[in-house]
Image: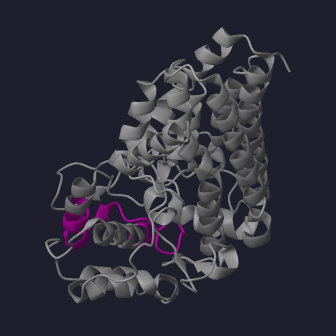
């Protein structure tokens, strides 16, 4: 029996490794690089000095002076992920600059060409996405110390004081807190395949515990992120050019495509954790169709390809939900419902956060001209370009419908 357990754990690690999922960090990139080869010093200089360059009105001129670099010297996945993060920051800063409505609709070829080539190599879109600014944008101050907010920092910041650090690090720590749930998935699927009710009964509480821990960590956002700074400053730099009236046709990547392209800004919907758990628990967010389902499906294309593959792997796996129902065991069904309930709690809390950080500041924003185009609902949209409250309510309500027993 002990041998079977060891074998099961080894098989689980192999599955996680195949899909670039870290045993301790989940979907986050372990120990991201902090420096690129010296050939790319000009990129790093701008990324490290973004707030000052924007404040001094020098950002766009500095970007336009950068030579056109080849990406051939970017060897290895971590080096390429760092470069993608850096170019994402530069692109957002170039497009939005001071965030005062002076928007650039063309990304110059010296940035656009290497950015798009690198994006193609990584299988990521040429815009700053969650995989960049959250999953690959961190370091430990003391390398031997713990993965805690006080011992961590981000690699690059936007204007808005410590708002970037608070928002990105809390998001990362939520990912890490939820990662034991992902680690449990191969064990759960194996238990279902082998009709092993006992192992399943022991593994499902790992999902519940880790989601409760993720909710606890999520609550730290109040301590580290100021709502007005997030809404009026950071949110601008995370906005994309899809579903955004300021760039209604998209962004032209000069020297790459002849027509503008539309990409959504970074969004928590680009996290693989919650889509993984929806699939695991048989919560049909995408199968039902509609705007929320389309948005979630689209957000998968902003995830690293290995993580997209993991979602497809889960979709072809056995149904945990059907197995639990078929056993007719009240205790097992209650444990399953606790998993669903933990997801509902997280999603309900996310709605509260959006109210505090987007809806309330939007309602308080002074309108210089009541006849202006501002009250179009754009202020209530998430950085991914969707009507965020309707989207989150739809996702939460679909989750609520997935309880096995009425609540």
Residue at the spot 44% in from the left edge and 26% down from the top edge: 315
In the image, residue 100 sits, relative to residue 268, either above or below, namely below
Relative image position of residue 377 (x, y in whole percent):
64, 43
In the image, residue 199 sits, relative to residue 306, either above or below, namely above
366 and 217: which one is in front?
Answer: 217
Q: Does the magenta stretch include residue 83?
A: no
Residue at the spot 43% in from the left edge and 36% down from the top edge: 311
In the image, residue 78 sits, relative to residue 279, either above or below, namely below
Observer able to see residue 78 = yes
Q: Is residue 108 magenta?
A: yes
Relative image position of residue 340 (x, y in whole percent):
71, 31
Magenta span covers which residues?
Answer: 92-116
Relative image position of residue 327 (x, y in whole percent):
67, 12
Residue at the spot 47% in from the left edge and 57% down from the top edge: 22
Number of marks: 0
Q: Left of 310 or right of it: where is 67?
A: left
Residue 251: quarter of image: bottom left
232 and 214: which one is in front?
Answer: 214
Colouring used for the render: one colour
26 and 361: which one is in front?
Answer: 26
364 and 72: which one is in front?
Answer: 72
Residue at the spot 72% in from the left edge and 59% down from the top edge: 367
Relative image position of residue 197 (x, y in whole percent):
64, 23
Residue 105: quarter of image: bottom left
Observer able to see residue 61 = no
In the picture, the quarter occupied by the C terminus is top right
Residue 61: quarter of image: bottom left
In the picture, the quarter occupied by the N terminus is top right
Q: Left of 116 or right of it: where is 53?
A: right
Q: Left of 158 or right of it: where is 309?
A: left
Q: Left of 172 or right of it: where is 10?
A: left
């Amino acid at each position: 029996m002990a041998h079977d357990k060891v074998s099961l754990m080894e098989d689980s690690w192999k599955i996680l490794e195949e899909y670039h999922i870290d045993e301790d960090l989940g979907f986050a990139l372990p120990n991201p690089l902090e420096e690129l080869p010296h050939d790319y010093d000009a990129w790093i200089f701008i990324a490290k000095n973004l707030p000052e360059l924007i404040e001094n009105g020098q950002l766009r001129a500095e970007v336009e002076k950068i030579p056109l670099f080849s990406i051939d010297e970017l060897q290895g996945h971590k080096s390429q992920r760092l470069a993608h993060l850096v170019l994402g920051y530069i692109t957002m800063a170039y497009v939005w600059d001071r965030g005062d409505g002076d928007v650039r609709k063309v990304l110059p070829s010296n940035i656009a060409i290497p950015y798009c080539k690198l994006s193609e190599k990584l299988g990521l879109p040429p815009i700053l996405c969650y995989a960049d600014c959250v999953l690959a944008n961190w370091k430990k101050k003391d390398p031997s110390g713990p993965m805690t907010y006080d011992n961590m920092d981000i690699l690059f910041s936007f204007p808005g004081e410590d708002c970037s650090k608070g928002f990105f690090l809390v998001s990362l720590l939520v990912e890490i807190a939820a990662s034991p749930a992902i680690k449990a998935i191969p064990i759960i699927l194996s238990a279902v395949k082998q009709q092993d009710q006992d192992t399943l009964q022991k593994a499902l509480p790992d999902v519940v515990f880790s989601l409760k821990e993720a909710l606890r960590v999520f609550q730290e956002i109040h301590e580290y992120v100021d709502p007005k700074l997030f809404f009026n400053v950071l949110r601008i730099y995370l906005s994309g050019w899809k579903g955004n009236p300021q760039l209604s046709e998209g962004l032209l990547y000069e020297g790459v495509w002849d027509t503008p392209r539309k990409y959504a800004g970074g969004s928590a919907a680009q996290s693989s954790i919650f889509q993984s758990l929806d699939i695991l628990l048989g919560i049909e967010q995408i199968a039902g169709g509609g705007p929320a389902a389309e948005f979630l499906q689209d957000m998968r294309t902003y995830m690293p390809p290995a993580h997209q593959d993991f979602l497809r792997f889960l979709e072809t796996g056995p149904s945990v939900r059907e197995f639990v129902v078929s056993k007719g065991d009240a205790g097992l069904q209650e444990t399953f419902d606790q998993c669903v309930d933990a997801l509902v709690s997280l999603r309900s809390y996310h709605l509260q956060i959006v109210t505090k950080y987007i809806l309330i500041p939007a309602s308080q924003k002074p309108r210089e001209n009541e006849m202006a185009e501002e009250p179009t609902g754009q202020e209530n949209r998430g950085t991914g370009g969707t009507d965020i409250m309707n989207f989150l309510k739809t996702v939460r309500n679909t989750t609520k419908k997935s309880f096995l027993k009425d609540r």
